[in-house]
Amino acid sequence: MLASLAPYTALWYASTTDYNEATLFNALMFAVASAAAQWVLRRRYAPLVARNSMHRVMLWGWLAVYAFVGIQMGWVLRPFIGHPEMPATFFRNEAWGNAYVVVLESVWRALR
């Protein structure tokens, strides 16, 4: 699903040069692809949930783990966007940071 959204991403990149907009657009594309995958999983899982309600708990557990890992994976893959003020490298030094720490620091700075 994410690969099928690549033409939209290419069009977005051709339309703007703002790094923050590119990062947010990539996050949106990851979210759309993840939502589509979860929708397919929910449809395929419906017969199991109908037979035993414990499968619903497992489905929600999977969604939580998927979201947690997916957010961090999106953060790790972020260096592939490129940054206009940094030299071209395969991975940047800060590429392996923690997405949740960065979000909390951003919220903390906004509140101060």
Image (cartoon, rainbow, N blue to C red):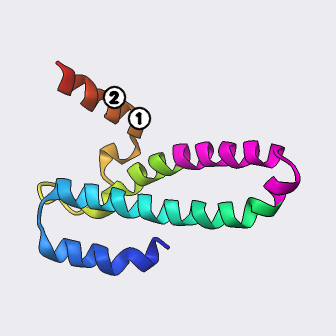
Q: Kindly report the distance in space between the C-alpha atoms of the residues bearing marks 2 and 1.
A: 6 Å
Q: Amino acid at mark 1?
A: Tyr
Q: Residue at horizontal 53%, vertical 43%? A: 68
Q: Residue at horizontal 45%, vertical 76%? A: 3
Q: Residue at horizontal 30%, vertical 76%? A: 8
Looking at the image, residue 17 lies above or below residue 78: below
Q: Where's residue 66, x and y in %?
A: 59, 50
56 in magenta:
yes
Q: Amino acid at mark 2?
A: Leu
Q: Is residue 90 visible?
A: no
Quadrant (top left, top right, bottom left, bottom right) of the C terminus? top left
Q: Residues within 10 Å of mark 2 (few under 14, many from 20)?
A: few
Residue at the disc numbered 2: 104
Q: Residues within 10 Å of mark 1 (few under 14, many from 20)?
A: few
Image-based side of 49 in relation to 15, left or right:
right
24 in magenta:
no
Q: Residue at horizontal 26%, vertical 56%? A: 23
> Most extreme residue toward the right, as rendered?
51
What's the magenta bit mostly, secondary-structure-wise? Answer: helix
Q: Where's residue 32, x and y in %?
A: 43, 63
Write down the quadrant of residue 57 in the picture.
top right
Residue at the disc numbered 1: 100
Looking at the image, residue 71 lies above or below residue 15: above
Secondary structure of the residue carrying tag 1 is helix
Image-based side of 48 in relation to 17, left or right:
right
Q: Return the residue nearer the eye: 100 or 94.
A: 100
Image: magenta residue range = 48-69
Q: Are marks 2 and 1 in contact (CB under 8 Å)?
A: yes
Residue 57: image tag: none
